[in-house]
Amino acid sequence: MAHSLRHGDIVPISQEGAELIATMTTTASRPTLMGTATDDPLSLLAKEWLVTNGIGGYASSSLLGVATRRYHGLFVPDLPGRGRTLLIPRLDETVEQGTGMALLSGAEYADGRIEMDGIRYLKDIRWEWQTPIWMFDMGHAVLEKRIIAPYGQNTIYIQYTSLSGSMRLHLRPYLTYRMHDARLGEGDAGADSFTMMINNGRYEIMLPEGVPTLKMCVRPRGGVFVADEATSEGVSYRVDRDRGSEHIQDLFSPGYFTVDLSDGQCVALVASVEPWDLLNFDSNDIVRAEQRRLEHLVSLAPALQQDDLSKRLQLATDQFIVKPGARPEEQAIAQASGDDARTVIAGYHWFGDWGRDTMISLEGLTLSTGRQQETRAILRTFARYIEDGLIPNLFPEGSRQALYHTADATLWYFHALDRYLSATDDRETLALLYPRLEEVVHHHRMGTRFNIGVDKRDGLLAAGAPGYQLTWMDAKVDDWVVTPRRGKPVEIQALWYNALRLMIQWGSQLGAKTDLWLQMAEQAEASFHQRYWIESGGYLFDVVDGEKGDDPSLRPNQIFSLSLSHPILRPERWRSVVDIVSERLLTPFGLRTLASDHPDYKPTYSGDLRARDAAYHQGTVWPWLIGHYIDARLRVYHDKAESRQLLVKFNDHLHDAGIGTISEIFDAEPPFRPRGCIAQAWSVAEVLRAYLKTKEA
């Protein structure tokens, strides 16, 4: 019998519930999360876990075992040619002991009910490596549950171990077949849409569009499958509801697995789209294999093992570095040329691989963690996609066709390559890529897509096309580009100048002519010095030659003028910029995107899509900016100890929102609530990189 709960009310509302509590006592009234007692267990609805598989797929939900987003699911593989597809959005886990039944995980419904019992027996949630583990104390038995995704496979293991006592498990998977970001209802249907085949302990669900079958089984083999169709009506996802989005759907289940678990025994429910011969492993073998893989990765950067923050961030970086699972031909091409294709997932749950995010994240994700070979693979992978002097802005979900609407991603590529070469001195890769980089500079000099090109009058780089948002401040709702920044954005000039100076440096190493690059760099620097400085404010214009003239909005983009390897801003102005950004934009979780006295300033990121996007870059705090802020600050003040103190709040954040990782954004005002994606690549990467950079010798 499942119980209905509402927020703040954990008292059984039924006679059956009261009897269940009486017969199955628990010591878990205050569960612990990573060693810290939780006073309000229902707060676990707002905290989320994430498990990834190294090829773009994932599993994720709230810590309470109730899905709160349409993206949540126990099995979301990245299917070739299709993208991330939700196949098992929910798994009901019922424990039977004698005459008592407890539903450990369940669902929330449109009328506000939360049906599940796990909150009554939950004793502890902890992490081993990147594996979440729950412990339930039911009086006469203690059950441990963990979730593992084998690296490089579209497979998930949900493992159950009896730490004491015997019990019977009923495991009911609900099925769907929709893109994880598709409208609710797409792919959701009844028995007619999900034909099951059963053969000697193997259970297969036929999927449309030629996709491999969804395979399910129990390992080690045991138990039975009970064909008992059920529809759960009116399931609601509270995060989508609170955002004003579609949030209600019906879910179908073809039946459930039943398996007996004795004292000390371990079993796992396995779901996969891989061949059956890959599903014969004991789940403990999968656990040990994943542990060995992560132990190896950890060994690549022993300097990160000195404190909890750097240890956890190093593990978090691994979730973003993936093989492009939905584009298998990319891996084939890379292997044919002796490489290995790699890319970066910008954020979970809804971002894919974005060029800008990848290049900004690369140093923190790979070089800071000792994964230079993957840095090389990512740089070479993106080089193969250069068109008209641009690297892709993104690959749309499930698409093989890249989109190129970005003015800065290609310039960040120069920065990423610079950091890689500084760490490795890989002349072979430089020689391979330099001709492509010459093409990039040529296209920018002559003009390329989206009106991206050098203004011959001042040598500055202009960009802008109606309906497009070409910088990282890229919010757009329908036809409304919130911060278009058309013209000559300040960070574009910083990146362009840095790229030209790097071309001079690299060209000299390779014996190439660099006179033109030098002439262009000197012209750009002189024009920047004349055009961007606001003498009365002691800071820089955010955009010059914009649609409404020069824009004096106080934004963090100016910090890049002195944070990159070759600063375009002259040293006598560094301190003023750092000081005003520190005073007006700095928060415990990064930099605000707009000063609070601006009329467009938004203190919180909330509401429907239009309201959220209106706040996305109008005050909202972005953690990734803290990395370049600290780079700039250290150039001026050389204060490693003080700069490191700016990162301490992230230690607490690892216990909030996405556990063990860093969110995409935060509100602009206290209490600085985390928002957006629960796990963002450049947030993790830049905090980790800055943390290492501020380490005292």
Image (cartoon, rainbow, N blue to C red):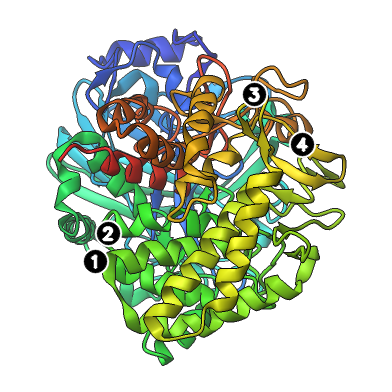
Q: Name the residue under label 1.
A: 281
The answer for how far apart the CA atoms under marks 4 and 3 are is: 13 Å
Q: What residue type is labelled 2?
A: Arg
Question: What residue does disc 3 label?
Answer: 595
| Tag 4 secondary structure | strand
- In this view, the residue in front, 313 or 600, is 600
Sequence-wise, which precedes: disc 2 or disc 3?
A: 2
Residue where numbered disc 2 is placed: 219
Mark 4, Cα crowd under 10 Å, few <14 / some 14-19 / many 20+, is some
The residue mark sitting in front, 2 or 3, is 3
- Of callouts 2 and 4, which one flags the residue occurring earlier in the amino acid sequence? 2
What residue is shown at x 22% (from left), y 24% (from top)? 35
- Discs 1/2, front: 1
Determine the secondary structure under disc 2: strand
Cα distance in 3D space between marks 2 and 4 = 62 Å
**Contact, CB < 8 Å: mark 1 with mark 2?**
yes
Closer-to-camera residue (108/314): 314
* Alpha carbons under labels 2 and 3: distance apart: 56 Å
Is residue 190 among what the camera can see?
no
The label shown at residue 551 is: 4
Q: Where is residue 299 in the image (x, y as percent from the top left)?
A: 15, 57
Residue 334 at what x, y percent from top left? Answer: 44, 84
| Quadrant assignment for the N terminus | top left
Pick whichever, 295 or 153, lies toward us.
295
